[in-house]
Image (cartoon, rainbow, N blue to C red):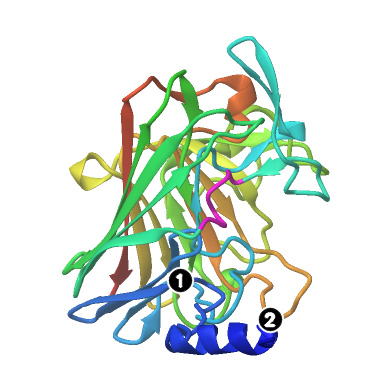
């Protein structure tokens, strides 16, 4: 009688060499244009690194590293948090998985850990896609497609979401880059953001309380540019004045005026800013999170600026990151 273990081993060997395992961050895609270079990770369609002449414009992480702190991830079908993970979905109460355990919320959507497929890869452009399957907390099927493209004006990102099933799917989207102005840390940089309002939240769980004018809170008026210093920020800003071309803009600069600029379309009327305060010294205030959002925190509950996608309907959002030289 033949040895089944030996037979199985022979069969496996006959299939040829096993593919090398993917890096922990997923399939890697690199694009370049002039002095710009961007590295995209397949897990979460994440912007893993972006440089200009070798200078970091975002806080990077290693290709064989599990993405830390949502660094560079795409956030959908909601950005930020849904309080307690509970929301009323057109008369039906839904419970989302609690992913921000310390505060008890559903954080940053459902696709940030999905393995996205590469649909197209050119020297200066890459397109990735994924399909979000229905679940108890979010019973909708979404097709998501993201394009990263480099040109003389930096890195341009466009996300297209389409409802591939029945029902009206609640939806929101945002990126999560940590911008780097240059040498030093967040305390050393100046933020310019022409926002008139900010969303006040509770200190413990960051539950939204209401919109206030930026002049009502010390240090929150960045309209003319302000050194961040030791200020703590983890708030959404809104009523952002349009810059040239009708787009919104945030600028993070060093003392000599160089740095990084992020711009985004009118479909993103909110922007979360976080000074990146962390207990780990190597990560503490290393970059400034600037997250343009289609809706504010807990929009699944409040309904503020929440998109609803009917069957076959789509939504597109775009933003750009460029060096200030």
Which residue appears at 64% of the width and 23% of the height?
Answer: 301
Whether residues under marks 1 and 2 lie with C-beta atoms below 8 angstroms apart, the answer is no
Which is more toward the observer, 102 or 256? 102
Image spot of residue 226 (x, y percent): 51, 58
**In the image: residue 304, left or right of residue 261:** right
The residue positioned farthest toward the front in the image shown: 1
Q: Which residues are magenta?
A: 108-114
Q: Is residue 12 magenta?
A: no
User: Label 2 neighbourhood size at 10 Å, few (<14), some (14-19), many (20+)?
Assistant: few
Q: Would you name the residue on which mark 1 appears?
A: 58
**In the image: residue 306, left or right of residue 2:** left
Residue 155 in sight from this viewpoint: no
Tell me: residue 147, above or below residue 187: above
- Give whichever of discs 1 and 2 has the lower sequence position: 1
Quarter of the image for residue 17 reads bottom left
Image spot of residue 188 (x, y percent): 56, 74
Which residue appears at 57% of the width and 28% of the height?
Answer: 139
In three-dimensional space, the C-alpha distance between marks 1 and 2, rounded to whole angstroms, equals: 15 Å
**In the image: residue 199, left or right of residue 209:** left
**In the image: residue 182, left or right of residue 283:** left
- The prevailing secondary structure element of the residues shown in magenta is loop
Q: Is residue 110 magenta?
A: yes
Tell me: residue 290, above or below residue 253: above
Which is more toward the observer, 224 or 168? 168
Q: Quadrant of the C terminus?
A: bottom left
Tell me: residue 63, above or below residue 125: below
Image spot of residue 307 (x, y percent): 44, 25
Q: Would you name the residue on which mark 2 appears?
A: 282
Image spot of residue 162 (x, y percent): 35, 34
Kind of element beneath mark 2: loop
């Amino acid at each position: 009688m033949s040895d089944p273990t030996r037979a199985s081993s022979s069969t496996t060997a006959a299939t040829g060499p096993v593919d090398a395992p993917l890096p922990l961050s997923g399939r890697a895609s690199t694009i370049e244009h002039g002095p710009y270079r961007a590295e995209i990770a397949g897990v979460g369609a994440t912007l893993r690194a972006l440089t200009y002449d070798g200078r970091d414009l975002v806080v990077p992480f290693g290709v064989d590293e599990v993405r830390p702190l949502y660094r560079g991830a795409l956030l959908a079908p909601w950005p930020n948090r849904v309080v307690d993970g509970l929301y009323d979905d057109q008369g039906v109460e839904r419970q989302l998985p609690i992913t921000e355990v310390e505060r008890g919320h559903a954080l940053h959507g459902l696709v940030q850990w999905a393995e996205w497929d590469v649909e197209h890869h050119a020297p200066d452009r890459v397109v990735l896609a994924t399909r979000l399957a229905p679940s108890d907390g979010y019973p909708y099927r979404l097709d998501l497609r993201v394009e990263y493209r480099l040109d003389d004006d930096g890195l341009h990102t466009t996300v297209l979401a389409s409802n591939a099933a029945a029902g009206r799917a609640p939806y929101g989207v945002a990126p999560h880059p940590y911008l780097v102005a240059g040498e030093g840390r967040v305390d050393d940089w100046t933020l310019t953001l022409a926002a008139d309002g900010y969303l006040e939240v509770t200190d413990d769980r960051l539950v939204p309380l209401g919109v206030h004018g930026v002049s009502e809170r010390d240090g929150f008026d960045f309209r003319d540019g302000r050194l961040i210093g030791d200020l703590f920020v983890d708030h959404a800003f809104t009523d952002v004045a349009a810059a040239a071309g009708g787009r919104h803009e945030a600028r993070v600069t060093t003392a000599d005026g160089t740095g990084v600029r992020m711009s985004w379309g009118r479909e993103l009327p909110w922007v979360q800013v976080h000074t990146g305060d962390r207990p780990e010294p190597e990560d503490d205030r290393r970059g400034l999170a600037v997250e343009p959002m289609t809706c504010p925190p807990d929009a699944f509950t409040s309904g503020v600026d929440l998109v609803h996608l009917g069957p076959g309907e789509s939504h597109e959002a775009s933003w750009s990151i460029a060096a200030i030289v």
